[in-house]
Image: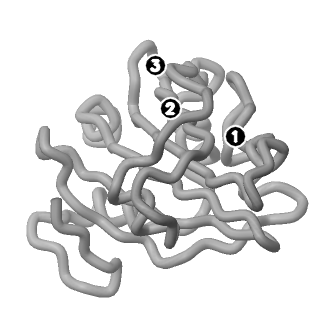
Amino acid sequence: MTFRRRAEPVPGLDAICADWLLDRGSLTRRLVEIAGPSFAVVTLREEPGTLSADECQRLGQPPGAAGWIREVHLTGLGQPLIFARSVMVAANGSEDTAAPLQRGSVPLGQLLFGDTPWSRSEIHLCRAPENHWQRHSIFSRKHQHILVQEVFLPALWEVLNR
């Protein structure tokens, strides 16, 4: 997978895709706008684990670093619209710093864009192996960093192009 910084032109990125992929605001808020009360977070995984080599590199960690992993589907209108994987490395080996990712069915966006918003790095784009658009960025506050990776599933584009 090759990631592109958001400032670089991206072949095949139409206006609707660009509007969604490059938006620095809350993805949760936008999904609620199109899905209304049918929006839900379906937790697939929420546990300690080993980060991938790419995740370690992006977070400046040695290969095989342990952290907290959260995988969810953001759903609406009866179908998954986004697959999201968020990872966080425990500061100084403390499990307490995993608390931001222990959210169950509560959207991570409520924390990241809430009363005390986290700062966001550049957005990087790529095509996932299934040719789905994917983006990632790092949210930071004090000494905490959360790598958020989002895969935009075909159902989202179908809803947006109706």
Q: Residue at x 60, y 36 (%)?
A: 32
Tell me, for residue 71, which label it has, or none: 2
Q: Residues within 10 Å of mark 2 (few under 14, many from 20)?
A: many
Which of the two discs, 2 and 1, labels the residue nearer the N terminus?
2
Q: Picture coordinates of residue 97 (x, y %)?
A: 79, 50
Disc 2 vs disc 3: Cβ atoms closer than 8 Å?
no
Tell me, for residue 77, which label it has, or none: 3
Asked which quadrant contains residue 28, the reply is top right
Asked which quadrant contains residue 117, the reply is bottom right
Please indicate, yes or no, whether residue 20 appears anywhere in the rendered image.
no
Q: Picture coordinates of residue 1 (x, y %)?
A: 16, 59
Label 2 vs label 3: CA separation? 20 Å
Q: Nearer the viewer, mark 2 or mark 3?
A: 2
Which of the two discs, 1 and 3, labels the residue nearer the N terminus?
3
Label 2 vs label 1: CA separation? 10 Å
Kind of residue sitting beneath label 3 = Leu
Q: Is residue 53 left or right of residue 112?
A: left
Q: Picture coordinates of residue 25 (x, y %)?
A: 60, 63
Q: Residue furthest top?
A: 78
Q: Secondary structure at mark 3?
A: loop
